[in-house]
Image: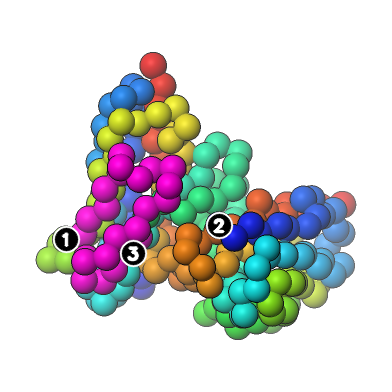
Amino acid sequence: QVQLVESGGGLVKPGGSLRLSCAGSGFIFSDYYMSWFRQAPGKGLEWVSYISSSGSTKYYADSVKGRFTISRDDANNSLYLQMDSLRAEDTAVYYCARKWGPVDYWGQGTLVTVSS
Amino acid sequence: EIVMTQSPATLSVSPGERATLSCRASQSLSSNLAWYQQKPGQAPRLLIYDASTKATGIPARFSGSGSGTEFTLTISSLQSEDFAVYYCQQYNYWPRTFGQGTKVEIK
């Protein structure tokens, strides 16, 4: 069965960096475009970033453009999100997702807290 | 950016009753709309895509309708496991955007 498992979340100070990872299994990872979404505490869902199946096309939400970088390693069935210059408003549960609309599978999420 | 507006914000329904949730888009989406269910502490789950197609394993009591700018999710007879927050998402335009959610609570 399809599984997406995120890791790498935690507490980081404003201005700091964090790298999220997502391990995919149960499907041919290289066939799919992948995305990251996030959900601030008690808030709704927000799309963060997208990467094509080839890795050649990447999109970012305006709120993270220039600070976050999405990448993938198909040999290891993995998706990554490098998050730099983190701000308090980046505090959220980050979800790895297969596709970006509609999203047919979601990971369980990893919590990122940006606080001093 | 496409603005998605869901109504009502909260819907109080008794088990066994019908629930009707609405989602309106600021521009026409054709049928490129999905519905998700999210329970506390869990990831969202895809219910409906292409406005009216049920995702794999979704019970028959869930149905979606609409096109253009007006969409509806109907739960024909609410079960205890259906009390959750429901989100609509458009995927006709970049960036993909969500409604703010409708919480379906027990009356």
Residue B92 percent coordinates (x, y) = 53, 72
Secondary structure type for disc 3: strand
Residue A28 percent coordinates (x, y) = 25, 76
Q: Are marks 2 and 3 on the same chain?
A: no
Residue A25 percent coordinates (x, y) = 27, 67
Residue displayed at 63% across by 63% down: B88
Secondary structure type for disc 1: strand
Residue that carries the numbered disc 1 in the rendered image:
A73
Q: Residue furthest top?
A: A116
Q: Choose top left, top right, bottom left or bottom right for residue A27.
A: bottom left
| The disc label shown at residue A34, or none | 3
Q: Choose top left, top right, bottom left or bottom right for residue B11.
A: bottom right
Label 1 marks which chain's residue? A
Q: Which residues are magenta?
A: A50-72
Residue that carries the numbered disc 2 in the rendered image:
B1
Label 3 marks which chain's residue? A
